[in-house]
Amino acid sequence: MLDKELRSMIGDVKDGRMDRRAFIQRMAAVGLTAPLANQLLSIGGVAMAQSPSPYPPTKRGGGGPLKLLWWQGPTLLNPHFATGTKDQDGSRLFYEPLASWDIDGNLNPILAAEIPSTANGGLAADAKSVTWKIKPGVKWHDGKPLTADDFVFTFEYASDPATAAVSISTYADMTVEKVDDLTIRILFKNPTPFWANAFVGAYGCVIPKHLFAEYKGSKSREAPTNLAPVGTGPYTFVEFKPGDLVRGKLNPDYHMPNRPYFDTIDMKGGGDAVSAARAVIQTGEFDFAWNMQVEDEVLLRLEKGGKGKTIYATGGDIEFIAINFTDPNTEVDGERSSMKTKHPILSDPKVRKALALLVDRESVKKAIYGRAGRTTANYLNGPEKFVSKNTSWEFSIEKASKMLDEAGWKVGADGIREKDGKKLKLLYQTSTNGPRQKTQAIVKQACQKAGIDVELKSVVASVFFSSDVANPDTYSKFYSDIEEFQIPMTQPDPALHMRRYISANVATKENKWQGPNFPRYVNKEYDDAITAAETETDLVKRAALYIKCNDLLWQDTVFIPVMHRLVVDACATSLKPVVSGWANRTDNIQDWYREA
Amino acid sequence: MSQYVLRRLLIAVPSLLAISLVLFVVLALAPGDPFSELATNPNVPPEVQAALRAKFGLDDPIYLRYLHWLNAMAHGDWGFSFVSRMDVDTLILQRLPATLYVIGSAQILALLIAIPVGVYAATKPYSLFDQIANTLAFVGFSLPTFFTGILFILIFSVTLDWLPFVYSTDIKATGIHWVLEMIRQAIMPVAVLGLFQAASMTRFVRSAMLDVIRLDYVTTARAKGLGQAKVIVKHVMRNAMIPVVTLIALQMPAVFGGAIVTEQIFRIPGIGSLLISSILSNDTPVVMAVTFVFACLVVLFNLIADVLYGWLDPRISLR
């Protein structure tokens, strides 16, 4: 359908000339599903028919204890120092942002009185500012009122480099000003179509000015509140033992009616994923366990006749094999995988396409991920409005062999292909992790059948993901031909996810391999699309640009997506958690309850 | 005596310094980064990771970092955890009670089993009791704790549903219920560790007893008409205990050091689990502090063992 026509139709719905249902029917006629049509309306600026998750409890408390099991326990409780999701999850019990992400990736107001939109005047037409109204009457756990000053302070705290906050980039390139006691305005330096990053989700948690004011900047680590949080959340702080236990109890002054349901909350840490699953599903000692990175087969066995089940949430986390566009075996000016080189084998698009044909995603799903994975051809897998429908994948050793023949790689005497006396040999690295080593084995087997000799390498995760400049085995140095890992999508917007691969972001010795474009992919068309998308205020056009970026990555075979991974948790049968694949596990903790 | 102790303590200083240097260099040379978790998070630009490294002095040369550490340690500052952003000593002190309780109980259990069984087996070598004790001891120390631990969990928690397998540091009960619950949750880890220790210790006690029991002075004591119990307890055991004391003394630091595997299986928040999680997250100040304290304890308990020899056997003089 023509872009213009679509937009005029959205305009019709907006002005009431066409009703929602008629619009959705017309979309269905051209093959768009109802949810997708709804998404189109919502990104076109039409307010969604709100469908808040049902919350039956009619009074606050009375739900007894809620026992959570995190097999890596939180080690600190300041959301702006949180190195991993475990710390964000622990902090989030006590601190709150303006809004959280719901299951479908829509904004859900927490401390905000309403979600800013063009209709309510919250969003500026030039996408350079956003105005948030704060819910009146919210109190910190110590009784002081929450005001706009706290938000302005949180911004100053996090954006001060001396504080060494991990949320610094969330608050970069903007200023936050107080409009009145219950209104703040965020002013962006550049037009920012994705305005819902600051003060939303894990890094959006607001901290109390009256307790942190003295500890901004280099004194940040001395703040006693770092270890004894005072927030606005549904639970108040009781006790914290790093890596072992976080305890909270019901906040009697919580700002949402009938919430929270539970009287106390315990978050226990330590151990491993399998025994955590066992404690929830088999023995019922705990109500909820986080991040079940366990083979599906094991979970299925535990679930037979157990006291709990596994639950799944869809986000945009992608497990992929990345291709190195530069030569990892030639050293130029003391740097391997230098931009001055070209990969001797993989710079040929035919070889890359052949490799993509050799990754048997269906087998990987069947043998390893099971219910926790979806096969995909895309690098960008959500939210729905950004997912490309133009791509496809298949597994075919014959087609791959044919393609390699065409590229001039002939099978040699030893069964390995060669060209101009050079063997088709690839080094395939990943981090040490059961499922990844199994995937390596599956890919290697298929490659062998097609005449590619694959050497496998696995690196300990703490080294692989390290930014240690002296270590040759990091993912960003990429001293191998292909490598596999997962990049999580931490918010339901592709801007940061896709920006990594512009040519200015290439990882080189010059930037100490900190450029996030580790495949060293350079494509002007891609750069232009990203630049255009970042300032595009028309949301339909913007989505189209990101879909184009995804399609470019697919056409050029920069990544071979292995699995679109879902979030897996174990949960007691009676517990009704609200878990979004677009946010931290505890991001909607106020809505959790137990069915009687 | 006091002069001897003083001299031994002074000798310990250079050896502890050497130990700390080796530990520090090994940890500094080990690959890894405490902030690696930030790497794949698209919200966190790599500069943040680099800024954090710089802030915590991770990019300084090793000798400078060592001198900083040594200086701080001399002033009683154990360091600052990268990962928890809090002082290491608070972190360690928080973990100590659980470790002392569980590992200490396990050691006591081991002694309570090993000494009577070992002694009795030695008085009647190759009897049926001795054979059974030996077989069980071999089985006991051949089975690693990660195996028996999981076996216990499957039997007593999953199948029979008698005991909890997740250790909880704050039991919501008071008085006698609290005590009972503390005992209930420690049964499995204490049994796993205690039986494992008891197995090897039984063998040790038995062989030490057998060495002494054949000596002439024992025959003399019996010839004097002393009763069997008196001969064994007053004459044989006291001498046979000397090597056993060394063994126990050298195991005492482990009581403080925790048991990495068992603590991990039962989620006991002890020093062992702190050590392993700190190693995995490259939190070097914590690893350094724990291992260094461990080294100090080994040196200290060696000294205590030597002092104890003098009490057990006055012929050993301390000069």
Image (tube, helix red, strand yellow):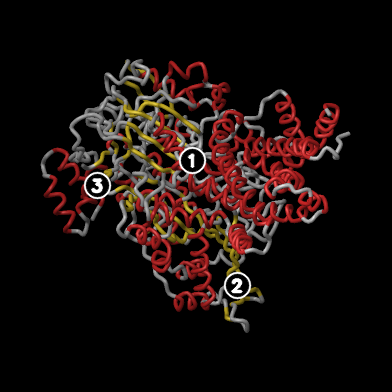
- Toward which corner of the image does residue A97 lie, by quadrant? top left
Location of residue A266 with respect to A448 vertically, above or below: above
Disc 3 vs disc 2: which is toward the camera? 2
Spatial CA span between label 1 and label 3: 34 Å
Viewer-closest of A395 and B123: B123
- What mark, if any, has residue A424 been given in the picture? 2
- The answer to whether A352 appears left or right of A192 in the picture is right
Find residue A169 and report its horizontal and vertical position in percent. 48, 34
Residue drawn 42% across and 55% down? A379
For the residues beneath circles 3 and 2, the answer to whether they share a chain is yes
Q: Disc 1 or 2, which lies upstream in sequence?
A: 1
Location of residue B80 with respect to A503 vertically, above or below: above
Q: Quadrant of the C terminus of chain A?
A: top left
The subunit letter for the residue under badge 2 reads: A
Element under disc 2 = loop
- The answer to whether A262 appears left or right of A203 in the picture is left
For the residue marked with disc 1, what is the amino acid?
Gly
- What mark, if any, has residue A84 been given in the picture? 1
Q: Are marks 3 and 2 in contact (CB under 8 Å)?
A: no
The subunit letter for the residue under badge 3 reads: A
